[in-house]
Image (cartoon, rainbow, N blue to C red):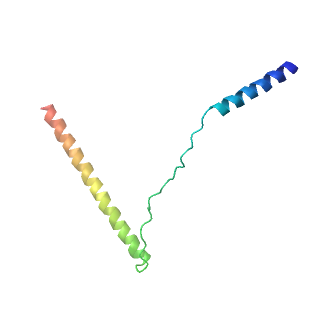
Amino acid sequence: MLDFKTNLDRFIEETEAFRKSVPVEQLMTRTVVEPNRTPSVNWEESEREEIGRRVANFKVHQQRFTREREDYAASELKRMLARRY
């Protein structure tokens, strides 16, 4: 048991000496900046008007996505038919 204790103490001393010999660089603190994603609030409008405006904006985006998807499908169909003949 004494041999084990001696080996453990020596190992701890070697580890501590190694730790002291390794240079430590100062770490830069990282700052995470979150973008301001909260929409501005207009207190003069009612909530119903704001919801209506957001729904209208969403519909415009959905129509654009639908149009792009249909255009892509049409171009792929045209390309496939051109290859076939």
Q: Nearer the viewer, residue 17 or 82?
A: 17
- Which residue is at a point 20% across and 45% down the rendered structure image? 74
Q: Quadrant of the C terminus?
A: top left
**Residue 57 placement: quadrant:** bottom left
Q: Classify 59 as above or below 30.
A: below
Furthest-right residue in view? Answer: 2
**Residue 9 placement: quadrant:** top right
- Residue 77: percent from the left, percent from the top? 20, 41
Q: Nearer the viewer, residue 53 or 14?
A: 14
**Residue 37 placement: quadrant:** bottom left
**Left or right for 30, reference 85:** right
- Which residue is at a point 84% across and 19% down the rendered structure image? 3
- Residue 7: percent from the left, percent from the top? 79, 21
Q: Classify 25 as above or below 38.
A: above
**Left or right for 10, reference 28:** right
Q: Nearer the viewer, residue 24 or 38?
A: 24
- Residue 33: percent from the left, percent from the top? 48, 56
Q: Quadrant of the N terminus?
A: top right
